[in-house]
Image: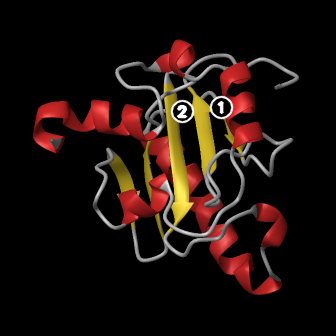
Amino acid sequence: MAAAMGVRGLLARAWGRPGQRGLAARGPGEEVERAQRTAEQPGPTVFSRILDGSLPAHLLYEDDQCIAFRDAAPQAPVHFLVIPRRPLARISRVAESDAQLLGHLLVVASQTAKAEGLSEGYRVVINEGKHGAQSVYHLHLHVLGGRQLGWPPG
């Protein structure tokens, strides 16, 4: 099935919108609705499936602590995610002992943004909980750039 569907189809399907990408695939209102329906639950997430290799992703960076990969439904010309290999569900639940890992995620985001040509700037976003539009309960940093971003966000 994976060979017939291809990486784009599998990733879009994993996000719940087969065959669609970009703003139409996962617009702001739709993402909020999805976050409202999604409850934090134990068990595998789409990101744990990427980490274990059962779901392909376009990797931009990997090391023993994290990976960075292109978002399946990009919201900007450049949109990638940085996720820790160790599953932390939410930024609100990190501990003091997670400080080194959190710093590493930001360093990887910065270095990957530079490698992606984002010399004019970019935005780093962490969605937290239902009101923060978190729809995957595995901590992840969105890095968006490649165009002028508006303010305020959301």
Q: Is residue 9 above or below residue 141?
A: above
Residue drawn at point x = 61 percent, y = 51 percent: 136
SS at mark 1 in the image: loop
Q: Residues within 10 Å of mark 1 (few under 14, many from 20)?
A: some
Which residue is more in the foreground, 36 or 54? 36
**Residue 9 picture quarter:** top left
**Picture coordinates of residue 12 (x, y %)?**
39, 32
* Residue bearing the label numbered 2: 118
Q: Amino acid at mark 1?
A: Gly
SS at mark 2 in the image: loop
Mark carried by residue 140: none
* Residue bearing the label numbered 1: 121
How are the colours assigned in the image?
A: secondary structure
Q: Is residue 22 above or below residue 42?
A: above
Q: Is residue 19 above or below residue 91?
A: above
Q: Residues within 10 Å of mark 2 (few under 14, many from 20)?
A: some
**Picture coordinates of residue 126 (x, y %)?**
73, 48
Q: Residue lying furthest top in this view?
A: 24
**Picture coordinates of residue 45 (x, y %)?**
51, 58
Which residue is more in the foreground, 16 or 52? 16
The C terminus: image quadrant: top right
Residue 154 relative to residue 147: left or right: right
Residue drawn at point x = 57 percent, y = 71 percent: 87
The answer to whether the residues at label 1 and label 2 have Cβ atoms under 8 Å apart is yes
Q: Amino acid at mark 2?
A: Leu
Q: Residue lying furthest bottom in this view?
A: 97
Residue 20 relative to residue 107: left or right: left
The residues tagged by marks 1 and 2 sit, at their Cα atoms, a distance apart of 6 Å
Residue drawn at point x = 82 percent, y = 83 percent: 96
The N terminus: image quadrant: top left
